Image: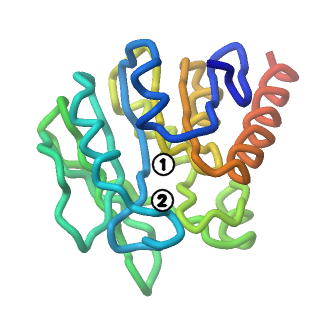
Amino acid sequence: MTPYYETKLGKLYHGDCLEIMPQLEPVDLVLTDPPYPDYHVGKYKYDESKILALGELNCKQLIFWTSKVDFVLDYSAVHIWDKKTGCGSQYERIFERNGEKNYKLYSHYFINSTVAASFTGDTFTGHPSQKPKTLLFKLLQDSKTSGIVYDPFLGSGTTAIACERLGRKWIGIEISEKYCEIAAKRIESEASQLKLFA
């Protein structure tokens, strides 16, 4: 199985996570933002079996989820991501599985434009579900785990970028080749910047 892109710390695979996941080495943390059953359903082709497959992994998990539909797996805690917006969906939930029972609040601006990205020191990729880098950094730090971080719905690559910044090993899968390319370019840029300051 050949990665679409890789660094010293991680590998990005292009394809369906249900097909690729059984071939992967064991992982220590799942940090992911899967398609939601009530948001861009046609575009992202929500498939509950892909969420249920995460239930087979016996590791700590942090899974972003809509505020409007019940989560389909068991969980140990529910965290809230306050998007600091005054309209629309003002928060999303982050379900923690196989982990702590403390409920936390994370306040980080939603990255939905170049202006929002500039304000927060991020980059807007055009992905409608892009998560802020600062939020992913914080979740990784709070996870109190080491080892490999797995994101089966990598999107524009924010989880991998956070891992690169924090020196964490990672595996990402993305079904869209368009977003694989965007993610690869972003990860490469992050890895190059880190080398400059090493």
Q: Where, by quadrant of the figure, is residue 132 drawn?
A: bottom right
User: Vertically, is 74 above or below 107?
Assistant: above
The residue singled out by tag 1 in the image is: 135
**Residue at the farthest bottom position:** 87
Quadrant where the image shows the N terminus:
top right
| Mark 2 and mark 1: Cα distance apart in space | 6 Å
Q: In the visual, does 106 lie left or right of 69?
A: right
Residue drawn where x is 22% and y is 69% of the image: 69
Give x and y (percent) for residue 144: 33, 23
x then y, percent, for residue 82: 37, 65
Number of the label disc, if any, that sits on residue 116? none
Given the image, on which type of amino acid does mark 1 rest? Answer: Leu
SS of the residue under disc 2: loop
Residue on which the image places disc 2: 108
Q: Residue at x 36, y 26 (%)?
A: 29
Residue closer to the observer: 176 or 148: 176
Q: Quadrant of residue 184?
A: top right
Report the front residue among 6 and 93. Answer: 6
CB contact under 8 Å: marks 2 and 1: yes
Dot 1: element: helix
Vertical order, 138 against 10 (above or below): below
Residue found at x 47% / y 36%: 151
- Which amino acid, mark 2? His
97 versus 149 height, above or below: below
